[in-house]
Image (cartoon, rainbow, N blue to C red):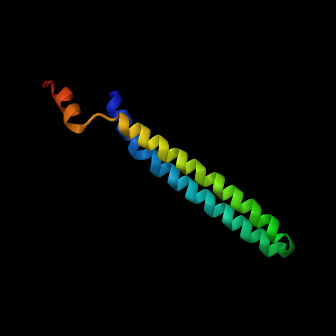
Amino acid sequence: MDYPAALAIGVCLGLPIAVLSAALGQGKAAAAAMEGIARQPDAAGDIRGSLIISLALIESLVIYALLIFFLMFSKLPSVMDYLGKVSGGS
C-alpha cells in the first residue's frame, strides 16, 4: 500500500471514528450526570456545571479531529493524477 492510499483510508475512517467515540462519550457523561442528579438533587447545580464543561471538552476533540480531517484531505492527490501515476501514464 502506498502513501496516498493509506492517507485516503485515514481520511475516510478518522473523522467517523472520532465522531462515534465522542457521541458515545457524551452519552455516557449525560447518563452519569442524570443518575447523579437523581441520587442527589441538592447537587444538581454542581453536576450540571461539570457536565457542561466536560461536554465542551469532548466536543472540542471532535473539532480538532475535523481540523485534522481537512488538513489531511488537502494533502490527497486528485484521483486522475493518482490513477495516471499508478497506470504508468504521464
Residue at horizontal 62 percent and vertical 53 percent from the top: 58
Task: Residue 33: name its quadrant.
Answer: bottom right
Residue at horizontal 75 percent and vertical 66 percent from the top: 48
Q: Is residue 86 left or right of residue 55?
A: left
Residue at horizontal 65 percent and vertical 52 percent from the top: 57
Q: Nearer the viewer, residue 76 or 28?
A: 76
Task: Residue 71: name its quadrant.
Answer: top left
Residue at horizontal 23 percent and vertical 38 percent from the top: 79
Q: Is residue 14 left or right of residue 50?
A: left
Position in image of residue 17 (x %, y %):
49, 49
Position in image of residue 80 (x %, y %):
19, 36
Q: Residue furthest left?
A: 89
Q: Is residue 83 above or below residue 38?
A: above
Q: Is residue 38 above or below residue 58?
A: below
Position in image of residue 30 (x %, y %):
67, 65
Q: Is residue 62 above or below residue 89?
A: below
Quarter the C terminus occupies: top left
Quarter the N terminus occupies: top left
Task: Residue 44: name its quadrant.
Answer: bottom right
Q: Residue furthest right?
A: 42
Count of marks, rendered view: 0
Q: Is residue 41 left or right of residue 61?
A: right
Position in image of residue 65 (x %, y %):
51, 45
